[in-house]
Image (spheres, helix red, strand yellow):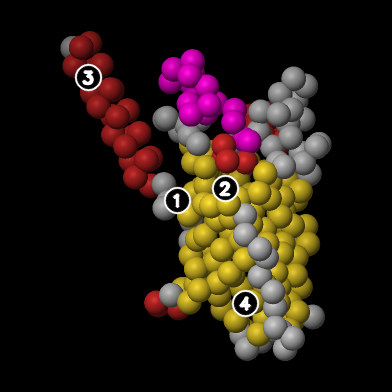
């Protein structure tokens, strides 16, 4: 009976891990940083409403995941005839929040991610030395079904990489909304290496997946 229970437990664990893997979003195309997009002389400025904008994140371990949010600090977009031309928004890394935990567990994970624990400053985002990240638009391309491919340089923790992912851009009155589909990036390309099997070879099953899932929501109002 004990062996049967063990077999059932192992089967359930494998199913859970496989399901977790299947639920992860598509990976963003990543390449070397590119020149920032330049707006037209007729472009109209939109200022990001940081109170209505945020980034949702999700991190994965072999048998569990954690979710959270990060707020934006500032941002400006340039729009011509309803089409996004260029722009930059600043991400406030000191606002990293964990949303699936409470109490001490929540506070401990947030401190670890921010790097405010002595001796663990560089494990993840080291917000004391790198309090901001930025995303700068390099190009946009219209797709089918009202989607847009958005490319931009993500600068984080002293590294800059260009990422490309699908978004939906809508205009309502003086407000523009940019909403991405969930996508993943390889955190090690921005020197976020803690717990990575691709960086450290002695972790066994005590590793954290390199892929970090992001969903970006940016709302900006005509200046």
Mark 3 vs mark 1: in front: 1
Q: Which residues are magenta?
A: 191-207
Label 3 secondary element: helix
Q: Is residue 194 magenta?
A: yes
Q: Most prominent secondary structure in the magenta stretch?
A: loop
Q: Earlier in the sequence, mark 2 or mark 1?
A: 1
Q: Earlier in the sequence, mark 2 or mark 3?
A: 3
Label 4 secondary element: strand
Q: Is residue 110 visible?
A: no
Q: Is residue 216 magenta?
A: no
Mark 2 vs mark 1: in front: 1
Q: From the viewer's perspective, tell me whether residue 9 is left or right of residue 128.
A: left
Q: CA distance from mark 4 to mark 1?
A: 23 Å
10 Å neighbourhood of mark 2: few (<14), some, or many (≥20)? many
Q: Which residue is mark 3?
A: 7
Quadrant for the N terminus, please.
top left
Give the residue displayed 34% in from the left and 45% down from the top.
22
Circle number at residue 57 = 2
Q: CA distance from mark 2 to mark 4?
A: 24 Å
């Amino acid at each position: 009976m004990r062996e049967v229970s063990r077999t059932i437990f192992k089967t359930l664990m494998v199913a859970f891990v496989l399901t977790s893997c299947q639920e992860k979003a598509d990976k963003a195309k990543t390449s070397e940083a590119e020149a920032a997009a330049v707006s037209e002389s007729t472009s109209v400025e939109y200022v990001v409403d940081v109170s209505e904008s945020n980034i949702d994140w999700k991190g994965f371990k072999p048998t569990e995941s954690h979710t959270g949010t990060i707020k934006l600090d500032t941002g400006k977009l340039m729009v011509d005839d309803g089409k996004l031309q260029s722009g930059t928004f600043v991400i406030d890394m000191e606002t990293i929040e964990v949303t699936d935990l409470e109490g001490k567990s929540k506070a401990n994970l947030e401190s670890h991610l921010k790097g405010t624990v002595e001796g663990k400053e560089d494990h993840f985002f080291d917000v004391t030395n790198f309090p901001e990240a930025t995303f700068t638009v390099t190009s946009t391309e219209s797709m089918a079904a009202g989607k847009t491919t958005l490319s931009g340089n993500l600068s984080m923790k002293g590294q800059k990489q260009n990422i490309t992912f699908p978004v939906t851009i809508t205009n309502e009155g003086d407000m523009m909304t940019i909403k991405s589909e969930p996508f993943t990036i390889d955190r090690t390309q921005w020197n976020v290496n803690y717990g990575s099997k691709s960086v450290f070879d002695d972790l066994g099953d005590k590793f954290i997946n390199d892929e970090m899932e992001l969903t970006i929501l940016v709302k900006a109002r005509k200046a």
